Image: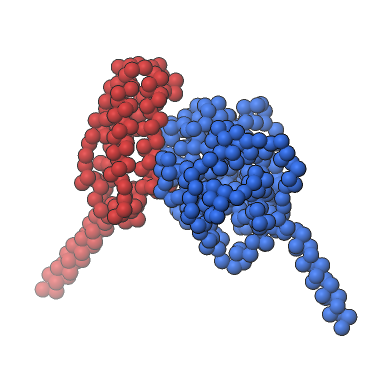
Chain colours: A blue, B red
């Protein structure tokens, strides 16, 4: 009887620890007082963060890429994730969201209802975004066309379908700050911001461990493409021998130094980077050239 | 009599082996000529885009005449129409040596519209290339985008 009681206490304590460790994090409202976004600047954040590449309907082109109906599937070893509707629809999208809700989603991977998002949504990278940029993005997102397409449920099996467990994943993989801790100059620091935070380049170009966490000690050194025979290329200077000018030009036009052109998911990325000011493309190139050789 | 039979068997075996070898090499090289031809067309694009891109990037000095000529060549290469180089079954799931995805031949394929979009971008570049460097720079980006327009849905990643 006594043993049973101790066992019950221990189990409860264990549950409490699990509950605490897996609790979805949120920012206090106070942090956003006086922050007002600018939609025009938000359009550039939108391009730099690549929102449309995942959240536009599959096959969307041109103007329809601004209808963020969702539906694009992302294969992974844990199942297939589907990008949700993030158009300003109050019912199916983010129409009812506050700026705080967007900040919590992007920086903490926590939904307005207090649930964990799956890290197919790159909140690990967006955690390093500046609040002002998210405010600008918010101002822009709510100007976009409404789509009333319901979000598609993820196709993820047990145990990964228990979202609370993502709290443990977050304990292991979030809050680590910058990978490049000492950028040599302002241009490289800007490139770091675009590559590591908004552009979330590492989400594809960095290999993942068995639990799907980014292997930060192999930063941007490439890795397998889930559900395909191909590989995301290694971007570190030991492998990527292109000049900084070549990299910047590739991000503008999609042309490699041999005048082959970007394909696959990178063709979408080029559509985004082509919209950035030339200084930003040069900054991304400077950052990549400043990485340690793999 | 016995020796003759042996020789006949040996000859038949040789023929069979030879035939198998031929069949083997044929299967492996199926559509090799077609694939080579269409890749050659892409190489012509890349060669002429390289001349234009070097000027746009500032690696080579802008030369109106050379730019116009390269853009004309690009348009000429684009005008080559050889559907016979794209037979059904010459995709990367069926044969070696190509990254062409089966989606090209799917019923809902919009490769025709994609090709037309490239034609329009190339025509605009042709009109701009010999004008001045700024015009060239402005017109080469959309050509790159049109390349990506096909390579995204229709070419396998390396």
Task: Give left or right: position of B81 versus A24.
Answer: left
Location of residue B147 in the rendering, given as x and y in whole percent from the top left corner? 37, 38
Q: Please give the name of the residue rendered at 14% of the width and 74% of the height, measured from the top-left corner.
A: B2
- Outermost residue, bottom direction? A1
Give the quadrant of the N terminus of chain A: bottom right
Residue A283: quarter of image: top right
Q: Give the camera-side residue of B3 and B117.
A: B117
Task: Give left or right: position of B119 versus A212.
Answer: left
Location of residue A39 in the rendering, given as x and y in whole percent from the top left corner? 57, 35
Establish if A211 lies above or below B8. above
Task: Give left or right: position of B66 versus A107.
Answer: left
Residue A114: quarter of image: bottom right
Q: Please give the name of the residue rendered at 41% of the width and 40% of the height, measured from the top-left corner.
A: A62
Q: Give the camera-side residue of A25 and A28.
A: A28
Establish if A79 lies above or below A219. below
Location of residue A106 in the rendering, given as x and y in whole percent from the top left corner? 63, 46
């Amino acid at each position: 009887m006594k043993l049973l009681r101790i066992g019950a206490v221990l189990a409860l304590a264990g549950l409490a620890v699990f509950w605490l460790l897996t609790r979805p994090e949120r920012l206090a409202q106070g942090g956003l007082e006086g922050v007002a976004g600018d939609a025009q600047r938000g359009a550039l954040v939108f391009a730099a963060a690549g929102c449309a590449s995942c959240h536009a309907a599959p096959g969307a082109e041109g103007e329809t890429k601004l209808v963020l109906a969702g539906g694009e599937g992302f294969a992974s070893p844990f199942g297939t994730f589907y990008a949700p509707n993030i158009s300003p629809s109050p019912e199916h999208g983010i129409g009812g969201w506050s700026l705080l809700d967007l900040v919590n989603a992007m920086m903490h991977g926590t939904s307005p209802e207090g649930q964990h998002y799956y890290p197919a949504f790159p909140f690990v990278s967006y955690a390093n975004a500046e609040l002002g940029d998210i405010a600008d993005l918010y101002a822009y997102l709510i100007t976009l066309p409404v789509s009333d397409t319901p979000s598609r449920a993820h196709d993820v099996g047990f145990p990964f379908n228990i979202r609370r467990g993502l709290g443990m994943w977050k304990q292991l993989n979030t809050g680590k700050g910058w990978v490049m801790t000492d950028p040599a100059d302002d241009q490289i620091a800007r490139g770091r911001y675009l590559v590591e935070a908004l552009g979330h380049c590492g989400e594809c170009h960095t290999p993942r461990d068995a639990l799907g966490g980014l292997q930060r000690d192999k930063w941007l050194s490439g890795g397998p493409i889930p559900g395909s025979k191909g590989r995301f290329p290694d971007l570190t200077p030991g492998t990527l021998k292109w000049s900084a000018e070549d990299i910047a030009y590739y991000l503008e036009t999609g042309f490699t130094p041999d005048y082959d052109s970007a394909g696959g998911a990178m063709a979408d990325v080029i559509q985004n980077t082509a919209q950035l000011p030339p200084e930003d493309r040069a900054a991304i190139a400077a950052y990549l050239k400043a990485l340690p050789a793999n | 009599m016995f020796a003759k039979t042996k020789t006949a068997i040996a000859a038949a075996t040789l023929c069979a082996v030879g035939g198998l070898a031929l069949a083997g090499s044929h299967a492996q090289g199926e559509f090799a000529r077609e694939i080579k031809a269409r890749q050659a067309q892409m190489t012509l694009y890349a060669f002429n885009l390289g001349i234009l891109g070097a000027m746009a990037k500032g690696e080579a000095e802008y030369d109106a005449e050379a730019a116009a000529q390269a853009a004309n060549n690009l348009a000429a290469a684009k005008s080559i129409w050889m559907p016979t180089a794209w037979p059904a079954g010459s995709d990367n799931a069926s044969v070696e040596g190509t990254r062409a995805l089966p989606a090209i031949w799917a019923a809902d394929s919009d490769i025709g519209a994609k090709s037309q979009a490239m034609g329009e971008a190339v025509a605009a570049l042709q009109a701009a290339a010999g004008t001045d460097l700024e015009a060239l720079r402005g017109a080469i980006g959309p050509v790159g985008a049109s390349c990506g327009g096909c390579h995204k849905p229709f070419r396998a990643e390396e």
